[in-house]
Amino acid sequence: MSTETQSPVRVTKEPPSGSIRPRRRLPRFAALGLYVAGIALGALLSALTGFSIALTVIYGAILGALAVYVGSRVVEGRRKATDRLVTALVTTAFAVAMVPLVSLVYTVLDKGLARFDGAFFSNSMFRVVGEGGGAYHAILGTVVITALAAVISVPIGLLTAIYLVEYGSGRLKRAITFFVDVMTGIPSIVAGLFAFALFTLVFGNDVRLGVMGAVALSVLMIPVVVRSCEEVLKLVPNELREASYALGVPKWRTVVKVVLPTAVAGLGTGITLAVARVVGETAPLLVTVGLITGTNLNPFDGRMATLPVFAFYQLTQPGTATQAFLDRAWTAALVLIILVMVLNVVARLISRLFAPKTGR
C-alpha cells in the first residue's frame, strides 16, 4: 500500500483592487535639492532688499524648510512632510550653531600659528620688549595653579557628593544643594574678589600669590565637581549597595569598595571636565595672581604668570612692536584651546577605559 505525500496548498487572499495605494517617496536627494533651492531664493530675496548674510540665512532657512515641507506634502503625505520639516529645522539649527565655533577655530588657527614654534614654548618674556620671547613661564604657571586648584577642589567636591548621595537628608542636604546651585552660577570675577579679600585680610593689600589664584579657581571648580560626581554616584545601582549590606559590610566600606570603584569612570570624567572648565579663566587670575615676565613656580611666593592673563596683557598692552604682541596673544589663545581639547579627550578616554565591564 503506497502513500502519496501531498504538499500543502497555500491559499492567499488578494486584497481588493484599489484598497492599498503604493507609497510614493521623493527621490534620494530631492529634499536636499528643495532646501538648497529655498536657500538660493532667500539669497535672491536678500539681494533685492539690500544683501546681508544674516538676512540670507534667515530667508534661506525659512524658504528652504517651507520648500521641503510643501514638496514632501504633495508627494509623501502629511506625516512624512512633518518629519522632513522637523529634520530640516533641527539640521538648520545645528548648522547655525556650528558657524561661530568653526569661525572661532579658523580665526585662532590662522592668527595663532604665526608664533606656534619652539621659541614660544621654551622662552619667557623676561627682558623682552619687542619681537621674540614666549609663554614658557605662563604655561608652567597655568599648570601649577590649575593643579593646586584641583588638589583643593577634588577632595571637597567628591566628599560633598558622597555625603549628598549616601548620607545626607533633611535640611542640611537641601541647604548644601541650594548653595551648590548658587555657586554654580556665580561670575568668575566674584570668585577672584573673594580670594583677594580673604588673603588681603591676612597679608595686606599688596599681596599677589599663585595660591590666591588656585583658591579663586577652586571656588568655581568645587560646584562643578559636586554636581558631576553626585549625578554619577546616583547612577550606581542600589542592588550593589544592598548586596554589600546583606553580607554585613558597613556603609563606609561599601562606599569605598563598591560604590566608588563602580563609578570611577564617571568620577574621573567629571573631574577632568571641571578642570577644563577653569583652566581658561582670566578674571579671577587678573585680580589675584597678576603677571610677571619671568618664571616663578612657587605658588606661595609672589606673582605668577598664567596663559589667560598673558594673552590678555599681550592684547591690551602692546609695546612698540604691536604685531609681535598680537601674535603672542593669538598663540596663547590657541594653546589654551588645545589644552581644553586635550582635557576633553582625556575625559573621554577615562570614561571608556575605566567603565565597568558588563559583557562576559
Image (cartoon, helix red, strand yellow):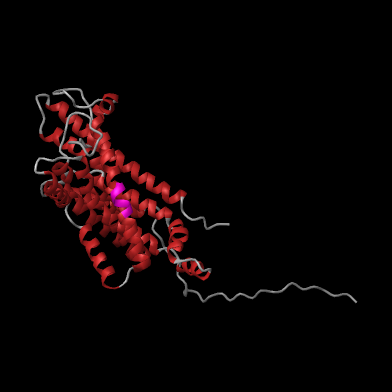
Residue 115 image offset from top left, x and y in percent: 24, 27
Residue extending farthest right? 1
- 268 horizontally vs 141: left or right: right
Quarter in which the C terminus is drawn: bottom right
Front residue of 97 and 148: 148
Q: Is residue 112 visible?
A: yes
Rendering quarter of residue 327: top left
Tell me where the magenta segment starts and ends, as one range: 150-155
Front residue of 348 and 76: 348
Residue at 17%, 49% in the rendered image: 195
230 to 104, vertically: above or below = below
- 67 horizontally vs 208: left or right: right
Residue 337 image offset from top left, x and y in percent: 27, 40
- 325 horizontally vs 358: left or right: left
Residue 7 part of the magenta segment: no
| Badge count | 0
- 293 horizontally vs 258: left or right: left
Residue at 22%, 63% in the rendered image: 179
Residue at 15%, 47% in the rendered image: 199
Residue 290 image offset from top left, x and y in percent: 15, 38
Residue at 26%, 44% in the rendered image: 279
Quarter in which the N terminus is drawn: bottom right
199 to 230, vertically: above or below = above
Q: Please tell me whether the stretch drawn in magenta is mainly helix, strand or loop.
A: helix
